[in-house]
Image (cartoon, coloured by chain):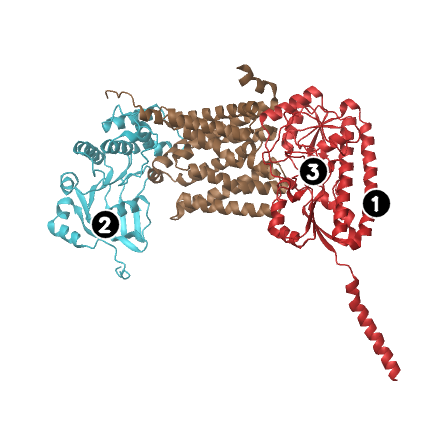
């Protein structure tokens, strides 16, 4: 048991760093993912991950595999797309899904064009798939900072965020914070995706956001508990994924997301709150 | 006690695009009044409330809400655009009513908790605090929303068809609350369909059919000839309408 | 009078005729396409002025995963000779040639060399210390546990025949052994002579001169390795592209990733490398111009092995860089290696 679960982390520093990085990511992405899901914005997360990619690629083309360049590039691209689509949704008849789709596709096409002009380069693959096993001090600092900012912001904006999901009309009638809160939330999504892509790559970073959140829905009907569950599942996926990569020789990033995916499937069937198993075998009902 | 709010309409036209839902409205909801808005379908009643709340900008004219330092407006829209599937408890939803006092960042202290409990009790939902809003019946949901209104402690309360499809017991209980608000000298305006209820409970009435047909004491307004005139007014917006010439 | 006029006319006609004759005698250059920068350098040394060379994958580019453009297809279509590396280095070349519809002669420069079969890293005890100074042209390596890394098994295209072995995939980085490059040069020369017999003499001369330079290079490399103490001839690098160098000159290369840069390292791979570095006491770690330097820095940080510099494996550097030609590349690599290991 020790050999299986603890030894790899004791023996190798890169495993410890990867674990810290994945855990920090889960801590930030978990709550954000829960809110995304509750606001019916799950696919928005996926779209934003695609929107970030070209920004990171451009940063990479300018400065190579430099943390600041790719981070800033990704942030700029993500924020632009998020803000533009948010504003279009607020002020025109076009709904969130269509306006976001339009902007992220534009962003992606632009990115591909720019990258193609410079020719192919293998390191771009590392932008796509990340290197959770190669997190240096800069990357870890970035991830933990993003997580701290995320948690702080969510704590402060908790009520308007919830209200915006549940009863946006009421919120608009008592406060003008609806639109800014929405935009700040989108910014948090972008921030977490940018933090995630250094470790997991742009394509998989959103997995750690959405899969634990989706799984948590099956364990609780209370928002706080859902957030706790999502974070826990995310962290466990990180640890188990790394162990899987170590013992079964699978690439690390995808292994983490695979574990999260299995956690989701397991929750789907066995979760206490509306899991498929419980729907089939309802058990005896209460008196009142 | 909050100072009561008056709402004055200066030749107000409200609508969507260029088609007016309400034309050339002039008049005032006096401070502390309890007014019912009645009229046929498509008469512009909901539109009127949306204009007061600020959700809709007038196509012409001005709506003046006399606001003092403690003016708060509470609005209960017609169809709740509430997401019932959101995992929120009754307690938390009612607590949202304190928003205007505590703001975005404010916490909820002991006195606030007492107020929340009181509001829930006032609508007869003690014991329901932990229930998820998705499990409530229509009547229970409406009670919860009224509890939230209570907490808002507003000087102007706007209700858009609050009793549609609600059971009689709940309706009666909630009407008591409306009366209480009137006793507390808050300005209350409610869009209603039940003319008998209006006669029983509401001292003032605005009869509207895309324009004000009559506005004043309920008994006077609800005369048969007024009701007839209201029914005759056109419901749908006319695609071939000419530009309105009236001043 | 008449005579003078006739002489003038004659002179003018002669002058005009000579002008028109000039272009006819000027040589048209033979269009040749080389797949990547290293080959391009070799072809340009042998072909000289007689050829018009286009290289598809430029300096610092990755020949493993290149995506050809329509412009490339046009070049290939117009070419009379296409020089590829062979050994399945360019997975994309067959499709490009087919779709371009070219009728150029296509050669694999690595024809007739002794290729090393590809191995999976974990089973690679890499404990093989090739003591011999010059690796050999025929016969091929020795039996250790070998698994095929990739699963495609299609035959080598263009009907190359390989020097006597069988199935499976081969390590394509044959140019890391100077001896193989001599064979490359010979193959290139022969192909050029075949399509352009008029230039046979020029090609032979160019090739001979270059081969002499290669011989010098080889001696220098062997001398440099000899000056490194035997217990220090171990090196870590991210890209497993130096098997031929290792076999030929006796340095041991240990890598965390497979031959192609497409595969991603698992935690186990990285852990094994670190363990190995610690156990074997490897002193130097190198970063290549086409791999993820972050991973190598992480390994270096954890084991204390020095990050030595940049090794060029699959591509030349731009002309202003330290590895603008093949010979410069090899000299750069051996210098960087000896500096790091001998210190």
| Chain letter for the cyan colouring in the rendering | B
- How many marks on residues? 3
Give the position of the C terminus of chain B as an image quadrant: bottom left
Which residue is disc 2 drawn over?
B42
Q: Is residue B123 left or right of residue C227?
A: left
| Chain letter for the red colouring in the rendering | C
Marks 1 and 2 on same chain: no
| Chain letter for the brown colouring in the rendering | A
Which residue is disc 1 drawn over?
C209
| Chain under callout 1 | C
Q: Residue A78, percent across and down?
A: 51, 41
Q: Residue at x 67, y 39 (%)?
A: C87
| Chain under callout 2 | B
Element at label 1: helix
Q: Residue B240, percent across and down?
A: 27, 61
Residue B170's place in the image compared with C280, above or below, is below
Q: Is residue B201 left or right of residue C192?
A: left
Nearer-N-terminus badge (3/1): 3
């Amino acid at each position: 048991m020790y050999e299986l679960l603890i030894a790899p982390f004791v023996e190798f520093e890169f495993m410890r760093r990867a674990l810290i990085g994945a855990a920090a990511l889960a801590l930030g992405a978990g709550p954000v993912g829960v809110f995304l899901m509750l606001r019916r914005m799950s696919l928005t997360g996926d779209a934003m991950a695609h929107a970030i990619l070209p920004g990171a690629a451009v940063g990479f083309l300018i400065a190579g595999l430099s943390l600041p360049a790719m981070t800033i590039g990704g942030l700029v691209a993500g924020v632009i797309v998020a803000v533009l689509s948010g504003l279009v949704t607020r002020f025109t008849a076009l709904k969130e899904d269509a306006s976001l789709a339009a902007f992220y596709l534009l962003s992606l096409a632009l990115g591909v064009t720019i990258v193609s002009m410079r020719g192919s380069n293998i390191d771009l693959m590392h932008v796509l798939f990340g290197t959770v096993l190669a997190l240096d001090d800069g990357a870890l600092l970035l991830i933990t900072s993003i997580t701290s900012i995320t948690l702080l912001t969510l704590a402060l904006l908790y009520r308007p965020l919830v209200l915006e999901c549940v009863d946006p009309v009421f919120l608009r009638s008592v406060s003008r914070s609806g639109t800014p809160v929405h935009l700040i939330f989108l910014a948090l999504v972008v921030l977490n995706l940018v933090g995630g892509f250094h470790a997991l790559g742009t394509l998989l970073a959103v997995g750690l956001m959405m899969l634990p959140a989706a799984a948590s829905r099956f364990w609780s009907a209370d928002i706080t508990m859902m957030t706790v569950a999502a974070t826990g599942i995310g962290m466990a996926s990180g640890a188990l994924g790394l162990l899987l990569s170590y013992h079964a020789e699978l690439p690390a990033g995808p292994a983490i997301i695979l574990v999260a995916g299995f956690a989701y499937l397991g929750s789907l069937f066995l979760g206490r709150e509306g899991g498929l198993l419980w729907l089939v075998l309802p058990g005896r009902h209460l008196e009142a | 006690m909050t100072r009561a709010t008056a709402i004055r309409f200066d030749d107000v036209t409200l609508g969507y695009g260029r088609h007016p839902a309400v034309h050339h409205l002039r008049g005032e909801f006096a401070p502390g009044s309890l007014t019912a808005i009645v009229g046929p379908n498509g008469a512009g009643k909901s539109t009127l409330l949306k204009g007061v709340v600020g959700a809709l900008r007038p196509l012409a004219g001005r709506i003046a809400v006399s606001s003092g330092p403690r003016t708060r407006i509470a609005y209960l829209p017609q169809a709740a655009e509430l997401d019932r599937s959101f995992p929120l408890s009754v307690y938390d939803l009612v607590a949202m009513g304190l928003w205007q006092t505590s703001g975005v960042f404010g916490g909820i202290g002991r006195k606030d908790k007492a107020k929340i409990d009181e509001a829930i009790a006032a609508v007869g939902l003690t014991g329901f605090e932990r229930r998820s809003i998705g499990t409530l019946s229509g009547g229970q949901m409406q009670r919860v929303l009224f509890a939230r209104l209570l907490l808002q402690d507003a000087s102007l309360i706007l209700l858009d068809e609050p009793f549609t499809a609600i059971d009689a017991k709940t309706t009666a209980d909630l009407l008591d609350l409306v009366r209480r608000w009137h006793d507390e000298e808050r300005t209350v305006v409610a869009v209603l369909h039940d003319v008998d209820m209006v006669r029983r409970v509401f001292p003032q009435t605005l009869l509207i059919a895309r324009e004000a047909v009559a506005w004043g004491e309920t008994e006077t307004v609800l005369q048969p000839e007024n009701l007839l005139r209201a029914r005759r007014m056109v419901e749908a917006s006319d695609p071939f309408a000419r530009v309105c010439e009236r001043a | 009078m008449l005579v003078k006029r006739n002489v003038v006319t004659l002179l003018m006609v002669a002058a005009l005729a000579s002008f028109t004759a000039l272009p006819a005698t000027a040589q048209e250059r033979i269009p040749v396409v080389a797949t990547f920068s290293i080959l391009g350098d070799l072809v340009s040394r042998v072909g000289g002025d007689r050829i018009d060379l286009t290289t598809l994958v430029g300096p610092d580019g990755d020949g493993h995963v290149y995506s050809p453009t329509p412009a490339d297809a046009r070049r290939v279509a117009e070419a009379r000779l296409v020089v590829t590396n062979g050994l399945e280095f360019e997975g994309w070349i067959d499709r490009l040639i087919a779709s371009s519809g070219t009728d150029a002669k296509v050669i694999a420069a690595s024809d007739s060399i002794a290729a090393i079969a590809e191995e999976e890293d974990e089973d690679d005890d890499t404990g093989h210390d090739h003591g011999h100074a010059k690796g050999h042209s025929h016969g091929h390596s020795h039996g250790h546990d070998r698994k095929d890394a990739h699963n495609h098994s299609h035959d080598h295209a263009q009907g190359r025949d390989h020097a006597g072995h069988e199935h499976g995939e081969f390590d394509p980085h044959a140019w890391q052994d100077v001896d193989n490059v001599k064979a490359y040069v010979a193959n290139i020369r022969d192909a050029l002579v075949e399509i352009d017999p008029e230039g046979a003499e020029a090609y032979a001369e160019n090739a001979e001169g270059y081969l002499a330079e290669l011989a010098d290079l080889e001696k220098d490399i062997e001398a440099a390795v000899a000056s490194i103490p035997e217990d220090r001839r171990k090196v870590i690098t991210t890209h497993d592209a130096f098997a031929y160098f290792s076999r030929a000159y006796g340095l041991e290369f240990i890598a965390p990733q497979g031959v192609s840069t497409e595969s991603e390292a698992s935690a186990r791979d990285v852990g094994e490398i670190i363990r190995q570095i610690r156990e074997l006491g490897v002193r130097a770690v190198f970063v290549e111009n086409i791999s993820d330097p972050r991973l190598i820095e992480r390994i270096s940080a954890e084991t204390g092995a020095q990050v030595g510099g940049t090794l060029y494996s699959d591509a030349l550097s731009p002309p202003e860089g330290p590895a603008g030609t093949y010979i410069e590349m090899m000299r750069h690599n051996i210098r960087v290696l000896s500096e790091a290991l001998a210190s």
